[in-house]
Amino acid sequence: MRPRHKKNLEARLEAVSEYFLTLRSESLNYNDAETEKHLLDMKELFGNDNPLYLEIGGGKGQFACTFAKQNPDKNILCVEKVRDVLVIACETAKDMGLRNIKFLDCAAEYLPSFLPEKTFETIFLNFSCPFPKKSYAAHRLTSERFLGIYKKLLKDDAPVFQKTDNMHFFEYSLESFSKNGFELSNISLDLHNSDFEGNIVTEYEEKFSSQGFPIYRLEARVK
C-alpha cells in the first residue's frame, strides 16, 4: 500500500533538513552507480569517527531511532526512498533529540555511488518488501545484485541482519545468501518465542506479531 501524500511535505522536510540528505541524481542510473562516485564523508556527516551502522528501508524510523537512543556512541545511517515516510522518521529523530542518526533519501541501487566501501559494522534489513511475484525477484533486497553491494559496504566479518514476517521471502533469502558467498547463523523461525535478547521491534513487527504471525530472523556474513 502506498503511503498517503503528506500535507505540507516540503515544509516539513525543510524543518528537519539537518537529519537527511537527498541523494537522487539525474546523472546516475542503476548500472553506473558502481563507477560514478559521489562519496559522502562520514566523519563530516556525523561529526565524529564512531562506528557506523546502516539500515536499508527504514520506514517511519522506529528501529533506527531506538537503536540511536540505545547506542549514543554509535552512528546509524538509514536509507528510505519514500519521502512521505522519511519525513516521519526525521521528525521522530528530532523530537527525541538524537544526534547520531542521519537519513538518506535514496534508492538502495544507488548506494555504491555515495557510500564508501568497508565502512559499516552491520547492515539491517527490517521487513523489506518481499516482491512476491517471481518477475520482480531482482528488486528484493536480498537478491544477488544487492548482496554484491553489501559485500563492498561491510567491514570484514561484519553481518547483515534480516527480519521479515514473510516465510517465502525468508526462504528465498536463505537460499540467496548461501548461493552468494554468505555464511548463515542465528536463524530464527519464531523470533518472539526464542531466547534472542536485545531485539528492537519495528512498527511492522508490532503489527504482524500482534496478529499472531511468526517473525523470521537471520544473520549473514561473507565467508
Image (cartoon, helix red, strand yellow):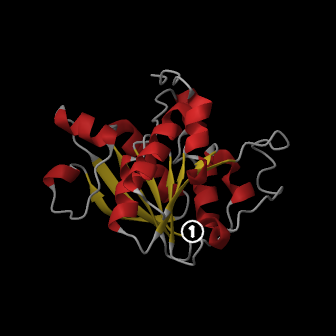
Identify the residue shown where x is 44% and y is 48%.
173
- Judge left or right: residue 58 versus residue 41: left
| Residue 183: percent from left, percent from top | 44, 66
**Which quarter of the rendered picture does the N terminus lie within?**
top left
Q: Is residue 82 visible?
A: no
What's the residue type where badge 1 is placed? Leu
| Nearer-the-camera pick, 57 or 187 | 57
Identify the residue shown where x is 26% and y is 58%.
199
Identify the residue shown where x is 42% and y is 75%.
73
Task: For label 1, count other residues whose C-alpha is less than 10 Å away and answer few (under 14), some (14-19) or many (20+).
Answer: many
In the depicted structure, whether residue 6 falls above or below residue 63: above
Question: Which residue lies under the disc numbered 1?
Answer: 154
- Judge left or right: residue 80 versus residue 33: left
The total of numbered circles placed on residues is: 1
Write down the quadrant of residue 181 in the picture: bottom right
| Residue 107: percent from left, percent from top | 63, 42
Q: Secondary structure at mark 1?
A: loop
Identify the residue shown where x is 75% and y is 43%.
30
| Residue 22: percent from left, percent from top | 68, 45
In the depicted structure, whether residue 96 falls above or below residue 130: below
| Residue 100: percent from left, percent from top | 48, 65
Q: Is residue 216 visible?
A: yes
